[in-house]
Image (cartoon, rainbow, N blue to C red):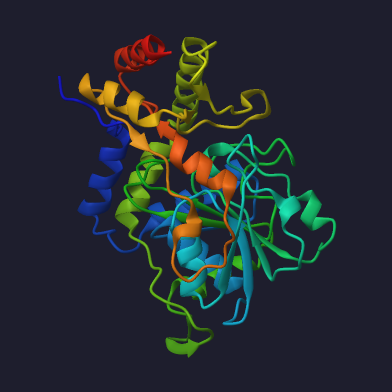
Amino acid sequence: MTQLGWFHTSITDLTRRLVSEALSKNYVTSGPHTRTLEKELATILGVPTCLYTNSGTSALSIALFASGVKSDSLVATSGIGWVATPQAIQLTGAKPHIFDVLEDLPILDCSKIIQKYDVLLPVNYNGRHPNLSPYIDKYPNTVVIEDSCKSLFSTSPITNRPSGTSGSFGCYSLGMISALPGAYGGIVVSNRPDDYDKLSVIKWHGVRYVDGIEQYHSRSYNFKSSNLHAAFALGMLDSYQERLARLRSIYQMYLVGLNGLENVRLLPSDLSAGEVPLLIDLFTPFRSKYIAALNASGIPTCNYHNSLSHLPDVHAPHLVNSELFANGVFHPPCGPDQDLSTIEQAISIIRSLG
């Protein structure tokens, strides 16, 4: 049997058929699969505007450009997440200011943001959602861009809305480690219907075509997407509910299997409120010991991302909690189509170490 990676999703037969259809009809760079994907996701998420682009990073960049950021704009974001978030801020010319996360969960601690920022960009990492009220109550007109790249189909217990739909813009990744894998791809959503045209222009180098004549509207970049990847994602969308159910089931396996351990804790997700635990996050002060034992038995793992305060050219004080999570969290085998016997073996080894 082929060893699966630490995160695994199987590609469906429908996905293969739709990609083959796109190729046979030469729907490669553009085609109907893209608009169908956008419309279906807009319906699921309950938003009027849903734009498909080539990555979650591009989705963040498009949203930042659409929000009107400039070279002197200040953007507040989280110390836990992926480098794409502050890099997207930097590449649009704005300045990322990175703030620490809560002591018990790796989500942005908005009580620490005491001045007004042009954009607040919280990271809803792995289906979890920060409470933005301490900041929004003071600065209600701030543009909020939700980085929900790893939280598609999750629901915020704070707003009771789908992740990414409570702010000015929401951004998602359709990479292979996501609830909707599309090989590569990203989504930008908005609650304003007229934003679709604005986002489309930004996606297409900031150019609009009127009667075949190019009109230059704004600074931008090549954020164009592939209809082949849209066909891939559209095929996977058909079975997304089944994948969500399996993710919840795998979370429950770890929750029950690791209950009562002194040195390892599963970072919680609120399943009853609709949070989706895309990844399994285990925290331990002895990470290297557990990873070594798992890897020695052929069980793959993955370390947590570094604290984003380590990136160059960002404004970040010493982020105590972000460093703690970055140095102590790892991902054991997970993903909706992971081999359950591998998960059971991982739980057994972790339990044996206490």
Residue 106's x, y, as percent? 58, 41
Question: Residue 341 falls in which quadrant of the image?
Answer: top left
Is residue 267 or residue 354 the one in the foreground? 354
Kindly identify the residue that appears in the image at 43 percent across and 49 percent down: 306
Give percent across and percent down for residue 134. 80, 51
Instruction: State the image quarter where residue 250 is shown.
Output: top left
Say which residue appears at 63% left-offset and 72% top-offset: 74
- Report the residue that reaches farthest toward the right: 137
Residue 24, percent from left and from top: 20, 52
Residue 224 visible in the current orientation: yes
Quadrant including the C terminus: top left
Nearer to us in this view, 33 or 168? 168
Residue 337 versus residue 79 in the image, above or below? above
**Horizontal side, residue 13 vs residue 305: left or right:** left
Point out residue 228 in the picture as x, y percentages from the top left corner.
30, 53
Residue in the picture at 65% in, 50% down: 165
Horizontal side, residue 156 vs residue 209: left or right: right
252 relative to 209, above or below = above
Give whichever of 328, 192 is nearer the camera.
Answer: 328
Question: Where the N terminus falls, by quadrant?
Answer: top left
